[in-house]
Amino acid sequence: MIVHCCHCLNCQRQTGSAFVVNALIEADRVEVRGTMPQPVDAPRDGDTPPQRVYRCPECQVALFSEYSRTDVWFVRAGTLDDPASVRPDVHIFTRSKADWVTLPDDVPAFEVFYDEPADVWSPAGLERRAALDP
């Protein structure tokens, strides 16, 4: 539906990197091969509820996350067969971006989060999102 590049401190801590690239995909469109990943509730800053991160039971790599809804998975682009084919549609939480990361001029960026999906989502992504909320 959309690809986020998140620069928040929580994502930095969870990945041990400067950011994470998540492809937001309807859960029923994702095929899990092998053993179902194990859910782990990861704490987040402040009063925010934990983020459910699903990890490979063998190697413990984070494969995808759930936030407030279970029908959309935030799939870690780095775990895909061709991670280089996934480009961020938007950069979020850039207020905590590492100083050495340079953002491309042609991709929207927000200090925190965007106000409306229509600000950054493609028409096709918005249509898929709307189909989740009958």
Image (cartoon, rainbow, N blue to C red):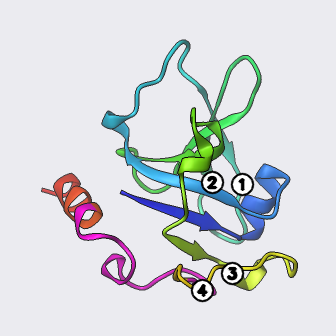
Label 3, secondary structure: give it: helix
Tell me the distance, in whole angstroms, between the alpha carbons under discs 2 and 4: 33 Å
Q: Position of residue 21 (x, y in %)?
A: 62, 57
Q: Which residue is mark 1?
A: 43
Decide which of tag 2 and tag 3 comes sooner along the chain.
Answer: 2
Q: Position of residue 28 (x, y in %)?
A: 31, 35
Label 2, secondary structure: give it: loop
Q: Residues within 10 Å of mark 4 (few under 14, many from 20)?
A: few
* Amino acid under disc 1: Pro
Per the rendered image, the range of residues in magenta is 109-124
Quadrant of image for the C terminus: bottom left
Q: Is residue 58 among the parts visible in the rendering?
A: yes
> Relative to 13, is 60 above or below?
above
Q: Which residue is mark 2?
A: 50
> Relative to 100, is 57 above or below?
above
Q: Which residue is mark 4?
A: 105
Tell me the distance, in whole angstroms, between the alpha carbons under discs 4 and 1: 32 Å
